[in-house]
Amino acid sequence: MQSRRMSYVPISAYFQWVSAGILLVVTIAAFAATIAGFLGFLPMLTLPLQFGEVIYPQAGAAIQVGAIVLLVAICSTLPSGFRVSRLENSHRDFSMCMSDVAEAYQFCHAADREGVFNLGTEYDAVKERIMYLRSHPDLRELEPEILEAAAEMSYASRELAEIYSDENVSRARGFLKHREEEIALFEDKIDRALSVSRELRRQKEAVEVEEAAMENRLHALEEEFGGLLGELGFSRTRTPGNVISMPHATAAE
């Protein structure tokens, strides 16, 4: 039965388009012939009528004009007829698409996170969501069943939308941003402390190098001075504190 219906729809649509095309061509041709008749390029329809003793010699022209008006009126109804036919076909071939439901649910869930819906009971809450989806400019072509399913899904996930509302998410992001700023400030303090520590260590090493150099020079001086004292006949004995004691010379010496 479904295959017969699917095969019937294209055939009926085909005949509808063919009929509309023929009607449009006939209307244009008749309208052009009538205009040409009024301008004298073509003869008008001659159909004398008599009503009692009265004869109407221009009845043919009047009938021709009336037929043109009727054809134009019929052609003006063709767009609405095609829209109705397309709507019937869409209802006949309708099947709920999960992508459309997901799209409608995303809009509804986003509005729920923003705190748009305030009604508490299930019936009123679902109805409020359906009205919101119907008024949305991007969802006007969706079927009512899709909007209803999306509204029910949004109502079922209302607690999730409340927990992850835009206000809560914004507050959490602000808290994390504040923590990041504190961490960055703490890292800056650590970097400065490390820099000071490295500078102190460098200065300490420089002082140690200078002290070692001074000790080496002092040791060299002691060696040189000790040799000179030996040549002069003085004996050198070390005492605590690196003090060299020398004997006192007499007056005769």
Image (cartoon, rainbow, N blue to C red):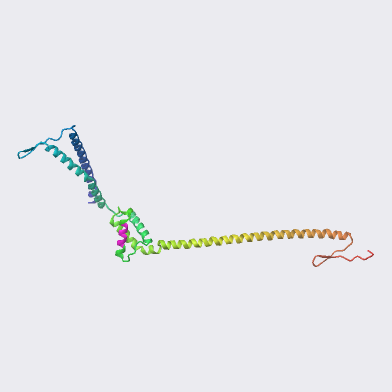
Which residue: 25% across, 50% down?
Answer: 87
The question of residue 76 being in magenta is answered with no
Q: Residue furthest top?
A: 41
| Side (left or right) of 59 relative to 27 | left
Q: Nearer the viewer, residue 192 or 55?
A: 55
**What is the total number of numbered labels drawn onto the structure image?**
0
Residue 9 place in picture, x, y as percent: 23, 47
- Magenta stretch? 126-133
Principal secondary structure, stretch drawn in magenta: helix
Say above or below: 141 vs 159.
above
Residue sitting farthest toward the right: 252
> Residue 38 placed where, x, y %?
18, 35
Q: Report if residue 7 is visible in the image.
A: no
Instruction: Pinpoint residue 21: horizontal percent, then vertical percent.
Output: 22, 41
Q: Is residue 118 left or right of residue 36?
A: right
* 143 or 73, nearer to the observer: 73
Residue at 65 percent across and 59 percent down: it is 199
Q: Residue at x 44, y 63 (%)?
A: 171
Furthest-front residue in view? 54
* 253 to the left or right of 140: right
Residue 124 visible in the snapshot: yes
